[in-house]
Structures are given as C-alpha cells and as structure tokens.
Amino acid sequence: MKTKMTTQTVMGIFSKTTDSNLVEATGLSGLDFIILDMEHGPATLETMHNHVRAAKISGITSIIRVKGMESHAISSALDTGADGVQVPNISTAQQAREAVNSARFYPNGNRGVCRFVRAAQFGEQDRNEYFATANKKIVVLQVEGVEGIKNLDEILAVNGFDVLFIGPYDLSQSIGKPGEVESEEVMGLMQEIATKAKAKGIVLGAFSDNLERNESLKKQGFNYIAYSVDLNVYIDACKKIIG
C-alpha cells in the first residue's frame, strides 16, 4: 500500500472494536487499510496483537493510531507487527522529528530495539532483515490544530514520515467550531494544508464521515482517506435492513 498511495487513492476505515473478527471481516471487504484506534478506542495493546493478526490474515494494511507522541507507545505499536503507526496531535517540527525518531531504527531514528517481538517473528526472523524491513513501515503524522498549521512549513520539512493526516473534527475544535467540519473556515484550512503538502510531494490523508466528502477529498488530492468508524458503519447497515 505504501507505493500505491503515492499514485492513487487508498480507502480505509477507523476501528474501535475489541473483536478481531470484525477487523478480519473488514479486510475481506477489499478496503486498503484499517486504522486500529488506541487514542479514542478501548482496545489494549494485547488486543492489538490479535487485531494485527486478523488484518494480516485478510490482507488489509494495519495502522495503529497511538494515544499520543510517546516513544514507547509508538515502538510498542510497531512491535505488534502492524504495517504502520499514526501519531496524533503533531503541532511542531520537533514533535514530528520525535515521532519519526521513535518509529525508525538507526540510521533513520532511535527506536527501542528488541527483536524478540511479534514483528520479528519472536526472534526467528534474520535480525538484519528485520531492522531493514522495519524502517519501511508507514508513519502517519496528524496535524489537527491551528498551532500545527502555523508550523506547517517546518513540519513538512521533517524527513522520514509518509503521510500528513488532517483531523477535521479536531481542526474544527481548535478554531472554536467543534463538529462544523464542512464550515468555510475548516475547509479553507484543509485546502491550505493540502496545497503546501502537495507542493512538497507528501501524501495527504484525512477523515471523512460521508461518501460525498470522499469524492471531494479525492479531487483535492487526498490519497489516504479514512471513512467513518467500523461500529458506526455497522449501525448504518443495520438501519438499512429496517428500511
């Protein structure tokens, strides 16, 4: 998926379930990726190991969104064998560098080293192969507020991350209009971010909670689109049964 999203749109979904069967079923749907949410979801790190297994079985790319910019949390998320990590609330270039540093081994970062983890087949994978492939994992940085936008040029200059993700709900909160994700101000800020990121050749990501918005994001150049949340999609599907 890492190569695919540089040339075309990849579609995914946020997951807040504790049931790995639902993660596996999402993969069977044909979606490109699933964001396993530890920031706003109830799943523990132990559950994440099973979620990542379920994603691998069904062929969907697994991205773990950690609770925040904490090096151990980022490293532990990647130790599960997830295909990538998503770090929320990036407001400064220093935070961006710290996130990358925590997600990459030398010479690209300073991630804590243990090869006796699921990501390295509990020590069975050749150590050199493990360290090389681990540095190819997807790193997504979320910019969600006005401070991050103010420092956007410096953040975009940081090396080592793959996707700049805009959280429209947190963005609306930061300008004093919580939930008004399609307001003129929020849409304008997202376009400003998109223009700068595209000029740097950086893949753009965003959250969407309606299908029409998916299409407009594609037209704006967003290649990593996370649509809604698994449990809410399930509710919508159940409502359609009622008619």
Image (spheres, rainbow, N blue to C red):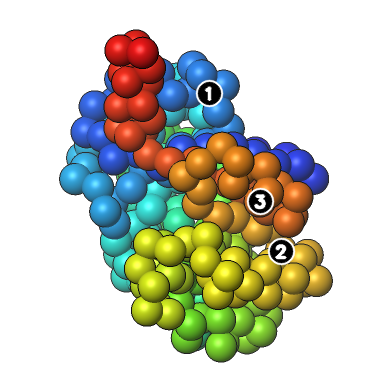
Q: Residue type at mark 1? A: Gly
What is the x, y in percent for residue 236?
A: 36, 26
- Residue at (30, 12) in percent of width and height: 242
Which amino acid is tagged 3?
Answer: Leu
88, above or below 213, in the image? below
The x and y percentages for residue 122 are 34, 37
Position of 112 with respect to 20 (left or right) is right
Q: Which residue is drawn at 29% across and 61% down?
A: 67
Q: Residue at x 66, y 84 (%)?
A: 153
Pick whichever, 158 or 205, lies toward us. 205
Mark 2 or mark 3, earlier in chain: 2
Between residue 71 and residue 185, name the one nearer to us.
185
Q: Nearer the viewer, mark 3 or mark 1?
A: 3
The residue to which callout 2 is attached is 202
Judged from this view, the residue extending furthest toward the front is 243
Judging from the image, what secondary structure is the residue with disc 1 in? loop
139 relative to 213, above or below: below
Of the two numbered discs 2 and 3 in the rendering, the one whose residue sits closer to the viewer: 3
Give the residue type that dot 2 points to.
Ile
Is residue 118 in view?
no
Q: Mark 1 points at which residue?
A: 59
